[in-house]
Image (spheres, grey):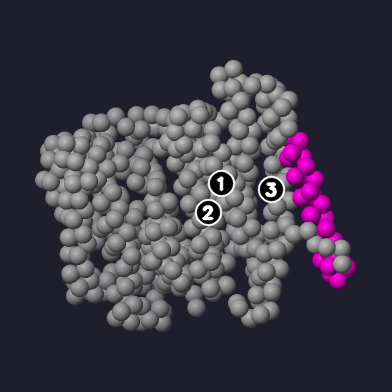
Amino acid sequence: MFLSKSLFQTLPKVVAKPVRFWDTFLLLSALMQLFAWYFALFLIGADTDQGDVYRILFVHVSVAWCAFFWFFASAFFGLRVFFQRDQQKAKAHDFSSHTSMEMALVFSSLVLMTGSFWGRPTWGVWWDWDPRLTSSLVLFLMGCGYLLLRYFTPQASYRIKISAIVSIISSINVPIVYYSVNLWRSVHQPQTFVQRTHNASGDIQLVLLINLMATFLLSIALYKVRRQSISLQETLQEFRGYQ
Amino acid sequence: MNEFVVHSQLRWWVRSFLLVFKSSFRSFWIRKSFWFGIFVFSVCLLILFPFALGTEFIQKLPVQLGCFWAIMEFVAVVSLGQCFYFEYEAMMLDVFLTSPMPKSTLFIAKIAFLTVQIFSLSLFVFLFWSILFHVQAIHSVTNLVCFLLLTFLFSVSSASLGVVVHGLTSRSLAKEILHPILFFPFQTGVLLGVSSLSLSCLGFAPLSAVWGQATWWTLLFVYPTIFITLAFLLAPIFFEE
């Protein structure tokens, strides 16, 4: 990820410049995330009902929003694959869709894990068959299905199209996950940033927004770094004649 | 002139559809043992559930219905796993693909055939289920009609989704694993809809008490419509060389 100085000098400027930029961006966003976690852990007071346990929600809500975003981003690039007539550009959109889905999967797994860590002391169980939890798990499984389908489909032109189809269909589940707490009887709390619910006080909302922003920037940096590596990997495989 | 072209194209599409549908039935009729095999498998599951859960516990309506829909899910997956198997074996698929017939007819006819197959199996599973599980609530005609309608909608939804997933995984190296991996998550909505509606049909108050019954019915009608449309639109991509 972080290339050594001597290796950088061997790279052409057009390659080295964006790599260096996004590496720096990743470092800065990671620092910002650390600051955001510092606010969440030490600056804001404990919750009257839940105590310190609630602090995990600053991570949980942020990664959940990022997961939703990357699922939609994957579907967006998937749509662009279909509307793009130029094969090279379609391939580039496919790489973006693939990377977005990987990001979505990473953040979905984090959502399930942090939710579980919060659920154990609060609900007394690691897992409950609640509509929000179940629909999130289904979303995660759809992402797994996407990556497995890509991995097991050797024909590149066909893989690009079917991956786009699966990413578009998977994104339909995102609104279902979001509205599941309203549609079904759920033990999960309703949406945080909804005016009528008043789920969080002003200071909590502010720290949550800072965390959300930091996680989002970090996810973009991770996306760009991963996107570069996928692009390089696919180009290398093409040169080797694997596709 | 245009009207004539559209009319003849439509007639051509319907003829192709009937040809694929008929050939599916014929190749299936030659291997009736396959249908019977799935049926025996579902009866084995019907016997297995009371053993696993205990005969006392299966007297409860939600458990009875849960067992029925779980068995139906297996029936659907096993049926869909062999989606184009007979056509591959008899080399009929090559004939269809090299002929000038519209590619969408292959998928739509397959959905129609699989719907009939899953629904016919579900009727027998339903009969044995109501006897073996002592289902009392099903005895009224209204309940029976409602339940059969749900079974039919389940069959259409499973068939349409299954055929699309089959198209997606057809050129993959591990389609036997990928098919259920992609099928089950997408099928969740249908399974949730039929189980909730069958519970409320038989006088139990499930989740649909919060989310109205009308929404579940809409979902069950919308689901196959989406996937049949997808099958129609995506068939040229799935069958391209």
Q: Residues within 10 Å of mark 2 (few under 14, many from 20)?
A: many
User: Looking at the picture, which amino acid does disc 1 mark?
Assistant: Ser
Q: Please tell me the numbered disc located at residue A143.
A: 2
Report in which chain the residue with disc 3 lies: A
Q: Residue at x 80, y 62 (%)?
A: A3
Q: Circle 3 is placed at which residue position?
A: A219
Q: Are marks 1 and 2 on the same chain?
A: yes
Cα distance in 3D space between marks 2 and 3: 17 Å
Q: Are marks 2 and 3 on the same chain?
A: yes
Q: Are marks 1 and 3 on the same chain?
A: yes
Q: Earlier in the sequence, mark 1 or mark 3?
A: 1
Q: Secondary structure at mark 2?
A: helix
Q: Are marks 1 and 2 in contact (CB under 8 Å)?
A: yes
Q: Is residue B190 magenta?
A: no
Q: Are marks 1 and 3 in contact (CB under 8 Å)?
A: no
Q: Circle 1 is placed at which residue position?
A: A108
Q: Is residue A32 magenta?
A: yes
Relative placement, left or right, of A34 versus B226 is right
Position above or below: B33 against A29: below
**Magenta range:** A7-36
Q: Secondary structure at mark 3?
A: helix
Cα distance in 3D space between marks 1 and 3: 12 Å
Q: Position of residue A239 (x, y in %)?
A: 68, 79
Task: Report which quarter residue B198 is drawn in.
Answer: top left
Cα distance in 3D space between marks 1 and 2: 9 Å
Q: Residues within 10 Å of mark 3 (few under 14, many from 20)?
A: many
Q: Position of residue A230 (x, y in %)?
A: 67, 64
Report in which chain the residue with disc 2 lies: A
